[in-house]
Image (tube, grey):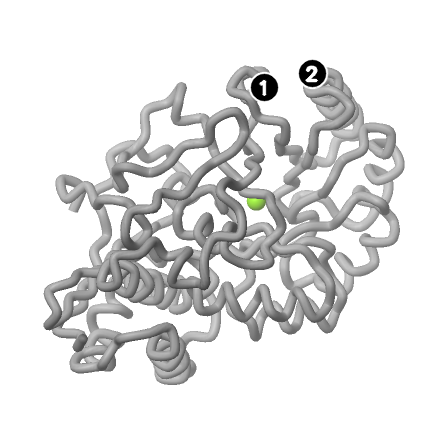
Amino acid sequence: MKITDVKAVYPKYQHVVPSWRTHFWQIVVRVETDFGTVGLGYGAGGVAGVEIVNRHFRELLLGKEINNVEDVRAIWDRLYVASLPYGRKGLTIMALSGVDLALYDLLGKAERKPVYDILGGARKTKAFCYATGEDSEMYLQLGYQAHKFSHRWTGADSDYDLAIEKAGQTRKLFGPEAKLMIDTYMSWDRKVTAEMGKRLAEFNIYFYEDILTPDDLEGQSEMRTLVKPALIAGGEHEFTHFGFGEVARANALGLWQPDITWCGGITAGLRIIELAKEVGVPVSPHRGGEVWGLHLVVATDCTDLAEYHSDHIRFERDNLWLDEPVPKEGYIVPSDAPGFGVILNEAML
Ligand SMILES: [Mg+2]
């Protein structure tokens, strides 16, 4: 089939708190073909991402044949090289992610297969989920056996006590077998991490996420030995297999978390997973319980750990994608409907 039109749209989000992270500036990319099939992808980059797709990528995509995974890879490479002078990372790759995911959705819909079948078939029927957020008791009631909460270093020595208290309470609540993780959102430094590693050791934390900025690869690498056997995790702010190549060479992280709607889509995700396999590091995509990461989690060598945010049960949110699967008793099952199996809520465009 031939691509006949490409259009990116920034949805009309209604439920926005004063933080870009609420909806991550996510954009929708629609790819139309002469076969009649329409592919829908989820990327990011806000209005800048929309401009990159509509004013640059679109002209490179029109008329291109898209019949298999090799075609998608070739298109990815072409768009990457064409946008390289202003791209390589950040908004450009977030926009490219939306195109790549739309092309995978397209292949799935054209062949009437879920994306995990396009990737060679599901290796597991469901993915083990962890709940990200602060409402530990609710996650336990929902049946989760894995949970990640946050800790922010503000500069006060009492921050150590807060971390110990929260880790202790959560371990007691979930029991000795549960996987517990802490996200510091780049607020710790080397000294704090070393100290936390010692003080929190008894709570058997599986990983500490985003302890330093993604540019301090050397620092993260040093921290790995200090917090053992806990892992240093990260990668949601890293882009493409080229970026993760740097992470690999620096031996910076013990668990990689590429965001499939930011890092370059499934094409980049597959290359990142390949690289991770070579260096023996597990991959657990950021927001991996959302369909864009979930199909990759069940169909590849990703570790069986999918992130999910369940807080919308209590707080209203925008429903951009309808028919999204939700975790039950701590596991999530991807839809076997064609493509990513979700329906776009057109009222939000
Ligand atoms: Mg995070």
The quadrant in which residue 27 appears is bottom left
x and y percent of residue 108 in the render? 29, 60
Front one among 129 and 257: 129
Could you tell me which quadrant the N terminus lies in? bottom left
Q: Write down the residue under mark 2.
A: 173
Q: At 83% from the left edge and 58% from the top edge, which residue is drawn? A: 222
Sequence-wise first label, 1 or 2: 1
Examine the rendered structure and indicate whether residue 40 appears above or below residue 52: above
Q: Residues within 10 Å of mark 2 (few under 14, many from 20)?
A: few
x and y percent of residue 228 in the render? 85, 47
Q: Are marks 1 and 2 in contact (CB under 8 Å)?
A: yes
Report the side of 251 relative to 61 (left or right): right
Front one among 243 and 31: 31
Distance CA(mark 1)–CA(mark 2): 8 Å
Query: Looking at the image, can residue 49 be seen?
Result: no
Report the side of 111 relative to 214 (left or right): left
x and y percent of residue 127 in the render? 53, 41
Q: Residues within 10 Å of mark 1 (few under 14, many from 20)?
A: some
x and y percent of residue 224 in the render? 81, 53
Q: Write down the residue under mark 1.
A: 140
Q: Which mark is residue 56?
A: none
Q: Quadrant location of ligand 1?
A: top right
> Circle 2 — which element?
helix
Examine the rendered structure and indicate whether residue 116 appears above or below residue 245: above
Examine the rendered structure and indicate whether residue 256 appears above or below residue 135: below
The quadrant in which residue 107 appears is bottom left
Q: At 35% from the left edge and 66% from the top edge, which residue is drawn? A: 100
